[in-house]
Image (cartoon, coloured by chain):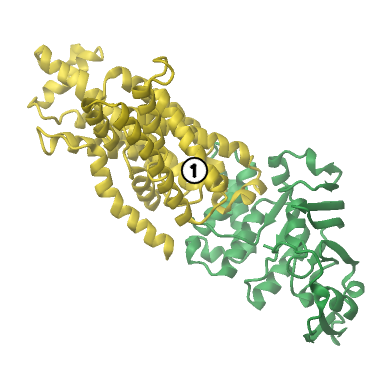
Chain colours: A green, B yellow
Amino acid sequence: MGHIAAVGISWSVKQSRLLDSVDLDAHDGQVVGLLGPNGSGKTTLLRLLAGLRRPDAGTVHYDDTDLRDFARRTLARRLAVVEQDISTSDTLTVRQVVELGRTPFRGRFDALTDADEQIIDSALEQADVADKQHRSWHTLSGGEKQRAQLARALAQQPREILLDEPTNHLDIRHQLDLLELLRSLGVTCVIALHDLNLAAQYCDHLVVLDHGRVAAAGRPSVVLTPDLVRTVYDVDALIDHEPTTGTIRITYRSARKRTNSGIGTPPVSADT
Amino acid sequence: MALGALATAALFVTIVSATLFGTANIGPLDVISTILRHVGLGAIAPTEPLPRLLDALIWESRVPRVLLAGAVGMALTVAGAVLQSVTRNPLADPYLLGVSSGASTGAVAVLLLGIGGGSLSLSTGAFAGALISFGVLLVLIGGGRVANPARVVLTGVLVSQFFAAITSVILMINGDANSTRGFTYWLLGSLAGARWQLVGVTAVLILVGVVAIQFFAPALDAFTFGWDSAAALGINVRAARVWLLVLTAAITAAAVAASGAIGFIGLLVPHAVRIVAGSMHRTLLPVTALVGAVFLIWIDTFARTAFAPNELPVGVITALLGAPAFALVLRRVNS
């Protein structure tokens, strides 16, 4: 369920083009990995997909509906976004944070219904933060905050989820848990990732961005090649198949010696 | 719900009992009888009518003053809670951010410079001044995009000082000794000017504003993790922000026009309420409104009776209590 189709997305800020004719398609519970170095446009693309910014050119459709035709609230009933920056000065409990996920379903003066409470319970459970639901947000570690945000997104009962580097504060076990959870939900996901091995292991489809353009797109086994890693990340890598499971395995050799090629390229804003 | 009922009961008890206190020595039963007579329940009044002068003292002075204190307390504390959420800054307070200062400038400009040719009231001037200073503040902090609390507060200090300076200039150039003295007192914050007409207008404005703000409680909750995050939860962020800022400016202006600049309670009360009622605005806003009303009524009762026959400006007391509270919140923000 859930179909995101972005075609020809371009976006510029102050003359500098951050995204240039980017296409992305995610459907039927696929987990689509968005790869690329810092500043390649991953976060920008996710914001445009979420309707938080308007693209200069191109269209985004959710199923057959143009993103521009969605009321904010209607969109929030099917699409959840997990952002990278999850700081607040408010003193909320984890459960209250997850409650926010019910916002698009609640009237201004409605109390939470029993159904809402059940949805919140199961979201807490799925993201493995049920035991921390009464803890104050400030007392959580970075990884616990990310899992609580994931629970909040799940409480929206979305058909599609956009996640911006949701694994970057997680320990290995929770990284695997998160990606396995996303796969098992059957929700269509677009997920910005840095870890190529995780991307190879868990994503059905990859879109690699480089300086705002799609450098490669397709199945991990097709996309992840030594050539691509060298051109996009400027890193030499050995890529083989893990003998028991057959999944792609990337071993980094070394950071390539910096050449002058990086200097003439247009400045791209930070990927945050 | 229980908390709301408790706070409502506390407000009711406070309004009744605060009118019993005063510099003139009038018995509680006489006070109650007087009030009952004026609200058309003279039949159940337990004592004989008071002499005219004492009757006026209670009905024309004490009662409106208590009600005004309640309304102003409600406005400033709710404004504080809203500003803290909208600017995403726990140190926000209408006084600290210069809104009260701007309202004062507007009031002085109308009163002493005759802007509007006498067609504008002090309240209108205060309202315009509050909106202008708020606008200046918002431009300087990028419409709330600046998340650094220290920078927001420093910008507020800047706006506040700037408008205070304009107020002083207007006062020094145009004011005679009497109006200057009166205004200085007003600038410190005082509820001594409470009369029925003023109370009526102020209370209606504030009640309408506070109820309207309650409509945006879900938006305020969604602002917890920033604008984008709120938008992704289906909130129309731009509309909610504009409405909240206009409503906040309106209730602040109404309060400041009636009572001068009473500082810090917008900081003190919402933070105290959060400890008990939590940070979710559906609960926080109504409880803050009620506690704010109760709090300012008692502070003002203290201000007018503790050092009789002298009266302390109520703003001085709120600053005495609020400044240490500010220090506490600041510590928590930094940790």
**How far across and down, in percent of the image, does residue A225 sit?**
89, 78
- Give left or right: position of B74 versus B65: right
Give the secondary structure at mark 1.
Answer: helix
Q: Which residue is mark 1?
A: B137
Please tell me which residue is depicted at 36% across the width and 31% down the height of the picture: B255
* Disc 1: CA contacts within 10 A as few (<14), some (14-19) or many (>=20): many
Residue furthest to the right in view is A222
The front one of A190 and B60 is B60
**Residue B20, relative to residue B294: is it above or below?**
above
Residue drawn at (49%, 47%) of the image: B85
Q: Give the answer, above or below, for where B34 lies relative to B282.
A: above
| Quarter of image, res B190 | top left
Q: Nearer the viewer, residue B283 or A39?
A: A39
Q: On the rendered structure, is A80 left or right of A228?
A: left
Q: x%, y% of residue B3?
A: 37, 42
Chain of residue at mark 1: B
